[in-house]
């Protein structure tokens, strides 16, 4: 079996989650001249770049408890100020 047929067969046999990677490889490189080793290297390279992008993502959480505590503190400060004014 020729390298080209083998490369095409491998690309067809990959699961659906690889569709974007397959499209990227097909558009960026000439598959008719690609060797199996090059294909494997390209797939590994794309997998590594995906992992590094996922590691860099972070999530920010909004905390309402702190806002409520600050509001209570401000109300306490106001009531203390009012008490001092009355003295």
Image: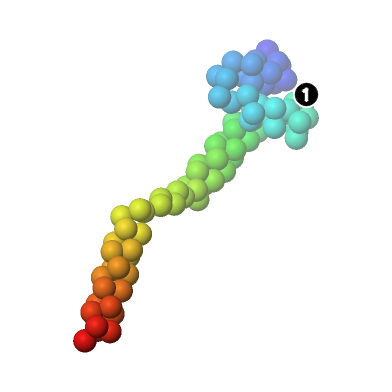
Q: Residue at x 76, y 31 (%)?
A: 27
In-front residue for pair 27/16: 16
Q: Look at the picture and state if 51 lies above or below 8.
A: below
Q: Is residue 86 visible?
A: yes
Q: Residue at x 69, y 31 (%)?
A: 25
In the shown orientation, is residue 30 left or right of residue 87? Answer: right
Neighbourhood count class around disc 1 (C-alpha, 10 Å): few under 14, some 14–19, many 20 upward: few
Spot the residue most to the bottom. 87
Q: Position of residue 18 (x, y in %)?
A: 59, 26
In-front residue for pair 63/53: 63
Task: From the image, tell me which residue sits under label 1.
Answer: 32
Q: Look at the picture and state if 81 lies above or below 66.
A: below
Q: Position of residue 84 (x, y in %)?
A: 24, 84
Colour pattern: rainbow
Q: Residue at x 50, y 43 (%)?
A: 54
Q: Look at the picture and state if 15 lies above or below 51.
A: above
> Which of the 4 quarters of the picture holds residue 14?
top right
């Amino acid at each position: 079996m020729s390298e080209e047929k083998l490369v095409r067969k491998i690309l067809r046999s990959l699961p659906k989650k690889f569709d974007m990677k397959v499209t990227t490889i097909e558009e960026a490189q000439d598959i008719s001249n690609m060797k199996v080793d090059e294909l494997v290297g390209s797939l590994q390279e794309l997998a590594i770049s995906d992992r590094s992008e996922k590691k860099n993502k972070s999530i920010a959480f909004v905390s309402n408890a702190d806002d409520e505590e600050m509001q209570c503190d401000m109300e306490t400060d106001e009531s203390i100020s009012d008490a001092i004014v009355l003295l």
